Image (spheres, helix red, strand yellow):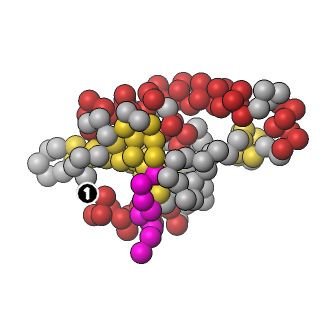
Amino acid sequence: MIIPGARNTVYSAGYMGSLGVIHYKAEEFRRNFKYGWKQFREHALNDAAKHLEKISPVLIKNPENKVEYALIQSDNPLTSSTIVLPQFRKKFKDLLGPELLVIVPNRSTILVFSGSENNLNFYKKTFINMFKDSIYPVSREIFRINGSGIRAIGDYGAK
């Protein structure tokens, strides 16, 4: 499944195996989810919502003591999937405003900026390094989350 506007980021159905995340093979997926993607997505979003409730972001502030961005770090592979939940926006709306810009450089890290006031360009090299240095990279795309949902709006790795 594709995220609107995304050029390099897609949803992928998987599960936790003994050595980490394993992507379903087509026949295995059909065997486990007789009602297809809709059934899988329902289960996955439910699991991601439970994980989101446990996440405690670290607020990174600028010298004026204003929140620059929220940093989420977790070893749980569900972390990156929480950005597609409506609850994700609700969690940050009061703090960062109704429109969020979200960076997910790797499976363990999410950076959440205000859509109206942000310094994304200031952090561009950091994002690129986080993506390149990761064992489990996720995306170089910038996601906008607002009342209409999630949409990829750019690529911080593009020249």
Give coordinates of residue 133: x percent, y percent. 52, 65
- The residue lying furthest to the bottom in this view is 159
Direction from residue 23 to residue 6 in the image, left or right: left
Q: Is 54 located above or below residue 125 in the figure?
A: above
Give coordinates of residue 143: x percent, y percent. 43, 49
The foreground one among 5 and 27 is: 5
Q: Quadrant of residue 123?
A: bottom left
Residue drawn at x 46%, y 25% is: 53
Crowd class of label 1 (few under 14; some 14 to 19; many from 20; radius 10 Å):
few
Residue drawn at x 11%, y 48% is: 64
Would residue 158 be counted in the magenta stretch?
A: yes
Direction from residue 46 to residue 105 in the image, left or right: left
Give coordinates of residue 99: x percent, y percent. 31, 40
Dot 1: element: loop
Give coordinates of residue 49: x percent, y percent. 53, 26
The quarter of the picture where the N terminus appears is: top right
Residue drawn at x 43%, y 32% is: 88
* Whether residue 47 can be seen here: no
Q: How many marks?
A: 1
Q: Which residues are magenta?
A: 152-159
Q: Which residue is mark 1?
A: 119
The foreground one among 158 and 18 is: 158
Residue drawn at x 37%, y 37% is: 146
The quarter of the picture where the C terminus appears is: bottom left
Q: Is 69 located above or below residue 39 in the figure?
A: below
The foreground one among 97 and 67 is: 97
Q: Is 105 located above or below residue 79 in the figure?
A: below
* Whether residue 81 can be seen here: yes
Direction from residue 56 to residue 28 in the image, left or right: right
Would residue 132 be counted in the magenta stretch?
A: no
Callout 1 amino acid? Asn
